[in-house]
């Protein structure tokens, strides 16, 4: 739990419990800030000739050096196509405006590359302060916690005062390993519902702006 962001909800009991203050939120991008495009990952694996049991980025890194560039470009081609069909998640701007009003820092940690990430910022989050933005050029990528820990260091905020919001097991594992509270955003088609009771998932929401009431009342993770 975190201390309520609404001053009227900050009781003596909460003070005595010394609940941590939420100071920063790290967001995944695909399926979190924008709606899921599950076809994208199938197309990537088809391009690489691998099945869904194989991690895409791990596969590329394991290839001989003279084949990595072509494999990476095949994946980026799919990502650029998906970029043009991006749709913002419901409640995205409401949550961003609320976090801005509360002085909560915001960052992105994604396994995508910088092109689609910048496209999302320009199209849906123009004027919203989000920094740093960690893409897959930073290694190791999620589920390793290094990206979140890098954000923690840059902010000067300990992970236990941060939240990781995502839609995949990689997001939940990275957040848990870093020491942050994890929030799972459920997909409308339920493809990630098996993660609700996963040991790395602390809280589940169906819309991004559901976080507002949880943070206002200090009930996140209660």
Image (tube, rainbow, N blue to C red):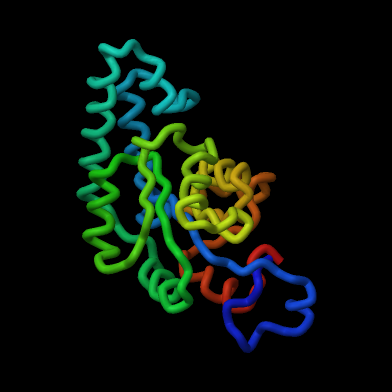
Apparent side of residue 191 relative to residue 61 in the rendered image (left or right): right
Residue 23 location (% of width, % of height): 54, 66
Displayed quadrant of residue 68: top left
The image shows residue 78, relative to residue 106, as above or below, that is: above
Displayed quadrant of residue 1: bottom right
For the point 47% across and 53% down, which residue is it?
Answer: 187
- Comparing 45 with 135, the one in front is 135
For the point 36% across and 35% down, which residue is it?
Answer: 41
Residue 118 location (% of width, % of height): 25, 51
- Comparing 199 with 188, the one in front is 199
Across the whole image, how many numbered discs are drawn on residues?
A: 0
Residue 189 location (% of width, % of height): 46, 51
For the point 43% across and 24% down, which residue is it?
Answer: 58
Would residue 191 be visible to someone looking at this image?
no
Displayed quadrant of residue 33: bottom left
Would residue 220 be visible to someone looking at this image?
yes
Apparent side of residue 98 relative to residue 71 in the rendered image (left or right): right
Q: Quadrant of the C terminus?
A: bottom right
Residue 54 location (% of width, % of height): 46, 23
Apparent side of residue 1 relative to residue 148 in the rendered image (left or right): right
Residue sticking out furthest to the bottom: 8
For the point 43% across and 78% down, which residue is it?
Answer: 101
- Comparing 214 with 48, the one in front is 214
The image shows residue 61, relative to residue 30, as above or below, that is: above
């Amino acid at each position: 739990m975190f201390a309520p962001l609404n001053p009227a909800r900050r009781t003596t009991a909460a003070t005595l419990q010394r609940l941590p203050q939420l100071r920063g939120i790290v967001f995944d991008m695909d399926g979190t800030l924008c709606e899921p495009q599950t076809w994208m990952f199938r197309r990537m694996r088809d391009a690489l000739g691998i099945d869904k049991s194989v991690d895409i980025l791990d596969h590329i890194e394991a290839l001989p050096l003279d084949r990595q560039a072509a494999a990476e470009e095949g994946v980026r081609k799919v990502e650029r196509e998906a970029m043009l069909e991006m749709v913002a998640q419901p409640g995205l701007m409401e949550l961003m405006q609320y976090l801005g009003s509360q002085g909560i820092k915001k960052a992105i940690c994604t396994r995508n590359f910088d092109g689609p990430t910048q496209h999302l910022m320009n199209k849906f989050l123009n004027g919203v302060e989000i920094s740093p933005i960690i893409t897959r050029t930073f290694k190791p990528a999620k589920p390793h916690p290094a990206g979140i820990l890098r954000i923690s260091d840059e902010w000067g905020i300990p992970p236990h005062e941060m939240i990781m919001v995502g839609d995949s097991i990689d997001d939940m594992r990275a957040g848990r390993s870093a020491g942050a509270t994890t929030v799972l955003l459920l997909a409308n088609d339920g493809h990630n519902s098996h993660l609700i009771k996963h040991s790395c998932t602390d809280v589940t929401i169906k819309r991004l702006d559901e976080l507002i009431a949880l943070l206002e009342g200090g009930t996140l993770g209660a």
